[in-house]
Structures are given as C-alpha cells and as structure tokens.
Amino acid sequence: MTPRPALIAILVLIAAPALAKPLTYGCACVGTAESPDCAAAGGIAGRHGQLHREVPAGQVAPFYTPSPAGGSGGSGWSCLAEGSYACLCLGAQDRPGCGNDAVAGGRGETRVALTLTDVLKNYGPGRLGRERTGWVCVLTDIWTP
C-alpha cells in the first residue's frame, strides 16, 4: 500500500510545530552609564563585550534585564532575537557617520543579510554614551531550522 499524499501532508502539518526551533536571543554586555560591565540582581553577570548566544526567550527578562534605551535601570545587557538583520547608519550626535570601534559607514548607508553575531560584535546598536556607534539594526528574518 502506497501512502496517500493528503495523509502525508496532514502528518507534516501536525509534526511541524513540534519540530520548530524555539525563539532564542543573543545578548551582548554593553555596560551601563555606571559601569562598563554587566550585572543584574539575581541575574547574569558579564564582562564588557561578552556575548551569550541561544538564550531561551523566557530567560531574557529575568536573567539579563536588558537596559532601556536611556541606558540606566538595566543590567547592561543588549539582547536581540537570533536571525538575519539589516542595519542603517543614522550617525551619532557627535559625528555624521557610523563607527566608533564598529564598522564604518556614512549616514544613510545600509547593510543587509547580517548575522546576529555580526550585529552584536561589529555594529553595536545597543552601545550607549561614548560607545554609541550610530548604527540602528532591525530583525529581517527569524531563523528556523
């Protein structure tokens, strides 16, 4: 007996959610206005520049307490979902382009198909204060197996 295509399609649809990889995050220690390192009460401590990959979504808020846009009141961690990114150079207040120990770029330049590691290490959209790079990055595709 040969399997029927309709039956195979139904089995694939039923099994697909169970096979999907859960959403995970990458977190970079960018520090706070008070300290270059990261620490959260009851959370994860880290050294400036340290990266943690494949952090389960449910562990981001309780253990990494990402800093708000102003940079105070958080742990110093900048967390982004695992996936592909596009970055746009908006520049920083004290300079027209992007860089500051990150990839150099002119205002308005875009970079696409970037990995999370590229974004966290080389573009630094979560860096604050004197370390601000001028890059703004957005998730374009969530990775799934």
Image (cartoon, grey):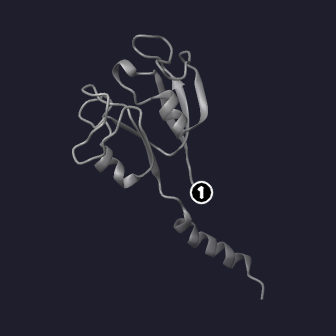
Image position of 6 with respect to 114: above or below: below
Horizontal arrangement in the rendering, residue 129 relative to residue 2 (left or right): left
Give coordinates of residue 85: x percent, y percent.
55, 37
Q: Identify the residue at image location x=57%, y=54%.
A: 144
Mark 1: give few (<14), some (14-19) or many (20+) Cα within 10 Å. Answer: few
Nearest the viewer among 5 and 36 is 36
Instruction: Decide: is 107 above or below 45.
Output: above
Looking at the picture, how far across and down is residue 67, in whole percent? 31, 35
Residue sticking out furthest to the front: 47
Give whichever of 144, 41 is nearer the camera. 41
Quarter occupied by residue 126: top left
- Say left or right for 35 vs 80: left
The residue under the point 56% across, 15% down is 106
Q: Residue at x 48, y 24 (%)?
A: 135
Q: Secondary structure at mark 1?
A: loop
Q: Which amino acid type corresponds to the residue marked 1 in the rendered image?
A: Pro
Report the residue marked by disc 1. Answer: 145
Q: Position of residue 136 (x, y in %)?
A: 47, 28
Residue found at the far left of this picture? 41
